[in-house]
Image: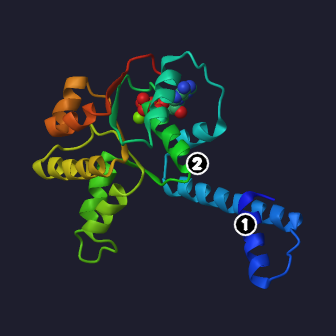
Amino acid sequence: MNHDAKAITDEISRRLRCAVVPDDEADARRQRWATASADATTESLWQRAEVPRRHAERAIARVPIDETHPWARERSRILGILGKSGVTLCLTGTRGSGKTQIAVDAIRAVTAAGRPAVFTTAQRFFIALKASYDGSAKRSEMQVLESFRRPSLLVIDEIGNRSESDWENRTFFELLDSRYGDMTDTILTCNLEPQEVSANLGPSIVSRMSEGGGIIRCSWPSFR
Ligand SMILES: Nc1ncnc2c1ncn2[C@@H]1O[C@H](COP(=O)(O)OP(=O)(O)O)[C@@H](O)[C@H]1O
Ligand SMILES: [Mg+2]
């Protein structure tokens, strides 16, 4: 019988003023229910993150990886810094070098730990926001923004695919700055050169990124 179950049994005994015989079988059953319910929660968090199927399958398959490959080293370094004091990082470099895969593996790890995560692309984020301006929209602009602001981990894939209009820049800054303030983690990906990343995100975001995360260059050959 675990410690909590013992404490409950003792409390019942005290209140009923009689001995309650511990029921190890019931205790084991409760433990199984608790485990099943935790599994259901992490599975539902994973489903709700809406990661691309291609990367999801690889993340679940646990394909043996060569731990000495720079991809694997970067992946484990990133998994190690998430969920602490909040990082904003941008994976950039060669197309096909597994940047999106690292981000999806991070979502897998975060949801497995029972914390919410969301995968989106820069374009989808702005489309979702614009859709909220329609009079018949189900969600307000604030609700859409909150759905990207709240998760423990937010992945925004392909940030190079945005117009960088004033409105986009201000909205992006608002989102990333509020996540920085909340000390949640944000992973961005793109295929831009580091100086283009700085231009895309602007100095205020780059400055926040330098506090934890930064621009990470994935320059090894493509897996495709
Ligand atoms: N470590 C790896 N080993 C083998 N295949 C990988 C690895 N990382 C990613 N892949 C696969 O290679 C392809 C390209 O990876 P992806 O993450 O989409 O690259 P990027 O986002 O850098 O363009 C995908 O099919 C992905 O599942
Ligand atoms: Mg990608």
Judge left or right: residue 69 versus residue 195. right
Q: Position of residue 197 (x, y in %)?
A: 23, 31
Q: Position of residue 17 (x, y in %)?
A: 80, 83
| Res 216 → quadrant | top left
User: Dot 1 surroundings within 10 Å: few (below 14), some, or many (20 or more)?
Assistant: few
Q: Please count the marks in the image.
A: 2
Q: Secondary structure at mark 2?
A: helix
Which quadrant of the rendered structure holds the N terminus? Answer: bottom right
Mark 1 touches mark 2? (CB < 8 Å): no
Amino acid marked by disc 1: Ala
Amino acid marked by disc 2: Ala
- Between 52 and 112, which is closer to the camera in this rendering? 112
Q: Secondary structure at mark 1?
A: helix
Residue 156 seen in the current view: no
Which residue is tagged 2? 112
| Res 126 → quadrant | bottom left
Residue visible at 16% across and 43% down in the picture:
164
Which residue is tagged 1? 7
Give above or below for 123 relative to 20.
Answer: above
Judge left or right: residue 217 versus residue 80. left
- Between 49 and 151, which is closer to the camera in this rendering? 151
Residue 60 seen in the current view: yes
